[in-house]
Amino acid sequence: MASDSAAGEAVQLEAGLRVVRADNPSPMTERGTNSYILGRGSVAIIDPGPDDPRHLEALMRALAPRERVSHILVTHSHRDHSGLAPALARRTDAPVLAFGSSDAGRDAQLQARIAELGIAEGSGVHRDFVPDRVVLPGATVAGSDWQLTALWTPGHMSNHLCFRGETCVFTGDHVMGWSSSIVAPPEGDMGAYIAALEHLRDVPAARFYPGHGAPIDTPQERIDALIRHRKLRESRLLEELAAGPADLTDLTARVYSDTPPALHAAARHNLLSHLLDLEARGIVLTDAARHGTHRYALACQ
């Protein structure tokens, strides 16, 4: 991907694959959401992006004369990926395909625990998202000159899919090159995230195309780095808890001391997901809330 390309500009990545970057930069989206146009003639759009009329027009301009959109594929229903799907479907008459609604695939036991803790859902979730067609893991979606296989990769979000092509994988927010993924309860699940990374590591691919940032030319190395990163955070968390019980605010400041304070809100979500995973594994205990604050401790203390 041309690093100097402007938002809204169609960039040819390889034969039969273009990308149009949405103009929604932020600390969580890098320079913006990548919307991929796969195929020629009858094309698929992977992750239509945010609900922005400018991006809708940019996608339509990127189509060649007499090209039509036959499929709209959504990796997951965070609004920066799925928000434009309804408008694009109305404009093109193409169906929207995804794993399911925003709560599809959530672990019931984890959700019950999250409800006990009173954890609210983030504003980025596309709550009323409903695909026209549900795509199950292992299902194949094909056009005249392209074919993709759906891989269920929960963790960043429970309804997250990656789409495997012949030599590449479209990884949404599960694997990005510029940053690690946010795993924020209730839609995020750290145990599922790491397990899906380990599964994806075994998928042969020459390149990953992420939802944000540049293509990843060393996919397995990137996955190994992400797993190491999460294991290191878990180890740091356990080190801090070995010194005694602590609440989430204190733990975030200590475990993420190498992270700019402006990103501590996102780091707090990741750390909570780690704590819930450790609790489910019997390694951490959660004290009853005192003055609205929960404290966490090692189970063996």
Image (cartoon, rainbow, N blue to C red):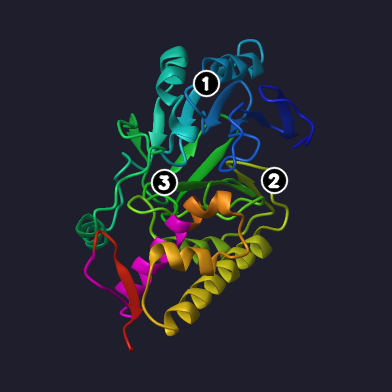
Q: Secondary structure at mark 3?
A: loop
The residue range painted magenta reads: 268-290
Q: Is residue 50 above or below residue 274?
A: above
The local crowd at label 3, few if under 14, some if 14 to 19, many if 20 or more residues have their Cα within 10 Å, is few
State the image coordinates of residue 51 (x, y, percent, origin top left): 47, 23
Asked whether residue 283 is drawn in magenta, I would say yes
Disc 3 marks a residue whose amino acid type is Ala
Residue receiving disc 2: 215
The local crowd at label 2, few if under 14, some if 14 to 19, many if 20 or more residues have their Cα within 10 Å, is some
Q: Is residue 196 above or below residue 129?
A: below
- The reply to whether callout 3 and callout 2 are in contact (CB within 8 Å) is no
Q: Secondary structure at mark 1?
A: strand
Q: Give the image quarter of residue 250.
A: bottom left
Q: Quadrant of the N terminus?
A: top right
Total numbered badges shown on the rendered structure = 3
Q: Nearer the viewer, residue 164 or 161?
A: 161
State the image coordinates of residue 133 (x, y, percent, origin top left): 34, 33
Please tell me whether mark 3 or mark 2 is closer to you in this view: 2
Residue receiving disc 1: 69
Q: Give the image quarter of residue 211.
A: top right
Q: CA distance from mark 3 to mark 2?
A: 24 Å
Residue receiving disc 3: 139
Q: CA distance from mark 1 to mark 3?
A: 20 Å
Disc 1 marks a residue whose amino acid type is Val
